[in-house]
């Protein structure tokens, strides 16, 4: 999945002169952070289980890595 994000960011970086991919992935990362905040504040047991915590962590790492890769590729 990370390779797909990086490939997409590379394609957009080649096509665009501005860092559009970074804006997209950075926006996704910001929205993801807000969602985690809202869910975490409303639930005392969030994420609920060890497996759910790993999934949330994995998604977070992938989103941030995609934003970072798109920033590097578009510079």
Image (cartoon, rainbow, N blue to C red):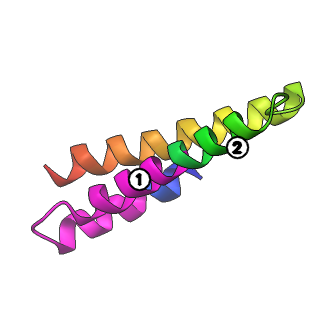
| In the depicted structure, whether residue 74 falls above or below residue 16 | above
Which structural element holds mark 1?
helix
Q: Label 1: which residue?
A: 6
Which residue appears at 34% of the width and 60% of the height? 9
In-image side of 75 versus 41 (left or right): left
Where residue 15 sits in the image (x, y, percent)? Answer: 20, 74
| In the depicted structure, whether residue 50 falls above or below residue 9 | above
Q: Quadrant of residue 56?
A: top right
Where residue 27 sits in the image (x, y, percent)? Answer: 38, 56
Decide which of tag 1 and tag 2 comes sooner along the chain. Answer: 1
Q: Main secondary structure of the magenta part?
A: helix
Sort mark 2 into few (<14), some (14-19) or many (20+) by Cα contacts within 10 Å.
few
Where residue 25 sits in the image (x, y, percent)? Answer: 39, 56
Which structural element holds mark 2?
helix
Looking at the rendered structure, the number of numbered marks drawn on it comes to 2
Which residue appears at 41% of the width and 59% of the height? 7
Which residue appears at 79% of the width and 36% of the height? 43
Q: Label 2: which residue?
A: 39
Looking at the picture, tell me which residue is in the foreground, 47 or 24: 47
The residue sitting at the bottom extreme is 15
Q: Let me know if residue 56 is in the magenta part.
A: no
- State the extent of the magenta-drawn residues as a range: 7-32
Sort mark 1 into few (<14), some (14-19) or many (20+) by Cα contacts within 10 Å.
some
Q: CA distance from mark 1 to mark 2?
A: 28 Å
Where residue 63 sits in the image (x, y, percent)? Answer: 50, 46
Which residue appears at 16% of the width and 72% of the height? 16
């Amino acid at each position: 999945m990370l390779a797909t994000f990086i490939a997409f960011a590379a394609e957009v970086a080649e096509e665009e002169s501005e860092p559009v991919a970074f804006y997209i992935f950075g926006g996704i990362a910001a929205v993801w952070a807000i969602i985690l905040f809202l869910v975490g504040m409303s639930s005392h047991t969030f994420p609920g289980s060890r497996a759910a915590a790993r999934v949330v962590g994995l998604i977070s790492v992938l989103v941030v890595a995609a934003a970072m890769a798109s920033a590097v590729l578009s510079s």
